[in-house]
Image: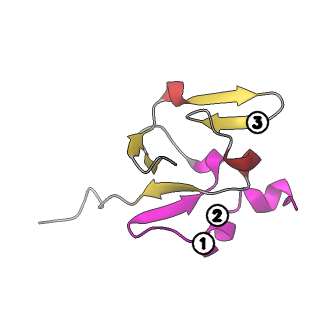
Amino acid sequence: MSLPKSECTDSRVWKEANCPNGYEAKHISEVRVGDIVLHPDGNERTVCAENFTRDPFMGLSLFGSSHKSGLEPVFVKLLPSPRATT
């Protein structure tokens, strides 16, 4: 079953995803350069512009994975606020 595009890109859909602690589930289109994502091999990777590709058939991909054409969430590491005081 595929979701309509408006529902796929709505971040509320991903709030119910089973996220590891310290990560937030996002749609692949919401991932930005500089984000730290949890790669399927279990390692954390920092996203740069060269990691994104667009295929006319599969759509946007990150590190060569389309995350099931946008139906599977990408786990992005939650970083502390830059304004946080120590």
Q: Report, in whole angstroms, how far the alpha carbon at label 3 lies from the one at label 2.
A: 19 Å
Q: Residue at x 63, y 66 (%)?
A: 14
Q: Is residue 35 left or right of residue 4?
A: left
Q: Report, in whole angstroms, how far the alpha carbon at label 3 lies from the one at label 1.
A: 23 Å
Amino acid type at circle 1 is Lys
Choose between 7 and 64: the one closer to the eye: 64
Mark carried by residue 15: 1
Asked if residue 16 lies in the magenta stretch, the reply is yes
Q: Which residues are magenta?
A: 1-30
Asked if residue 20 lies in the magenta stretch, the reply is yes
Question: Label 2 neighbourhood size at 10 Å, few (<14), some (14-19), many (20+)?
Answer: some
Task: Give x and y (percent) for residue 32.
Answer: 51, 42
Helix, strand or loop at label 3? It is: strand
Amino acid type at circle 3 is Gly
Q: Residue at x 75, y 28 (%)?
A: 55
Choose between 82 and 32: the one closer to the eye: 32
Depth check, mark 1 against mark 2: the one in front is 1
Q: Residue furthest left?
A: 86
The reply to whether dot 3 and dot 2 touch (C-beta < 8 Å) is: no
The residue carrying mark 2 is 11
Amino acid type at circle 2 is Ser
**Which quadrant does the N terminus fall into?**
bottom right
Q: Is residue 42 above or below residue 55?
A: below
Q: Is residue 10 left or right of residue 47?
A: right
The residue carrying mark 3 is 59
The earlier-in-sequence mark between 3 and 2 is 2
Question: Label 1 neighbourhood size at 10 Å, few (<14), some (14-19), many (20+)?
Answer: few
Helix, strand or loop at label 2? It is: helix
Q: Residue furthest front?
A: 41
